[in-house]
Amino acid sequence: SFIDDGKKARVMSSIRMKRKNASVYDAQIHAQKTRFKNRDCWLLIALDVTDRIKDQQALTRQQHDLQMIFDNVPAMIWYKDGDNKILRLNKQAAQSMGGEPEDFEGKSVYDLFPQMAEKYYEDDLEVLRTLQPKLGIIELLAPVDSEQRWISTSKIPSSLPGSNEKRLLVVAHDITPLIDAEMKQEALIETLTASNLELERFAYIASHDMQEPARMISSFAHLLEQDCVDQLDDKGHIY
């Protein structure tokens, strides 16, 4: 690159150089135009930046790996500050809200989840105050522009090194199918319970209706035995 500040021109470039022992290293060349003994000349400085480049490459690879894990872990993840603002989120979390991560980073939960924001924030404050994780919170995910879902949420607090700033990691799993299945099961149980009660009432009524004719027959048989005992043969006595 070439920089001209109007007074002295400077050139900066990164190249690969070879040492006397034939080993190769990355160098950053700083060239500055100057005057020496009333003559224009260039001052060249070569800095060995091999370690710095290796560190940058390692950091880039690490960031890539972490981003890959962050976006592909089977969970919705939000990283928030202590003021209910979303600092980062992964693709699953963004998709649950109907967008991409860059659409929501830096925005307040109050704008994105107005229906549930206060409830979310109450839990956040408790976790940040106690610095104790809160796991398995069953709650409703209610974005402004997307479908509502039931989620199981865990909130893990952290503090930034060297400061009093607090952060919150929110990890959630969609449990809507489980909730729907439970609701269907509960509805089925209620239906079966009502059916059993109806059957019990029917059995009671049927039993009562059957008992009355049996009592009438028994009474008539007793009267017949008393009034007509002399007229009955052996078979009549048996009946």
Image (tube, helix red, strand yellow):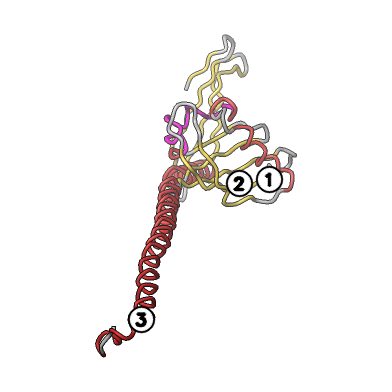
Asked if residue 192 can be seen in this view, the reply is yes
Residue 141: x, y in percent? Answer: 51, 37
Residue 7 magenta = no
**What amino acid is labelled 1 in the image?**
Val
Q: Residue at image x 69%, y 51%?
A: 132
1 and 2 marks in contact (CB < 8 Å): yes
Q: Secondary structure at mark 3?
A: helix
Spatial separation of the CA atoms under disc 1 and disc 2? 7 Å
Q: Residue at image x 54%, y 20%?
A: 10
Q: Residue at image x 24%, y 87%?
A: 235
**What amino acid is labelled 3 in the image?**
Glu
* Residue underneath mark 2: 155
Which label's residue is closer to the chain start, 3 or 2? Answer: 2
Spatial separation of the CA atoms under disc 3 and disc 1? 87 Å
Answer above or below: position of 12 versus 140: above
Residue 93: x, y in percent? Answer: 47, 38
Specify whether 128 is left or right of 117. right
Mark sitting on residue 225: 3
The magenta stretch is 93-108
* Residue underneath mark 1: 127
Residue located farthest toward the top when viewing the structure as drawn: 6
Residue 161: x, y in percent? Answer: 70, 44
Residue 226, quarter of the rendered image: bottom left
Asked if residue 24 can be seen in this view, the reply is no
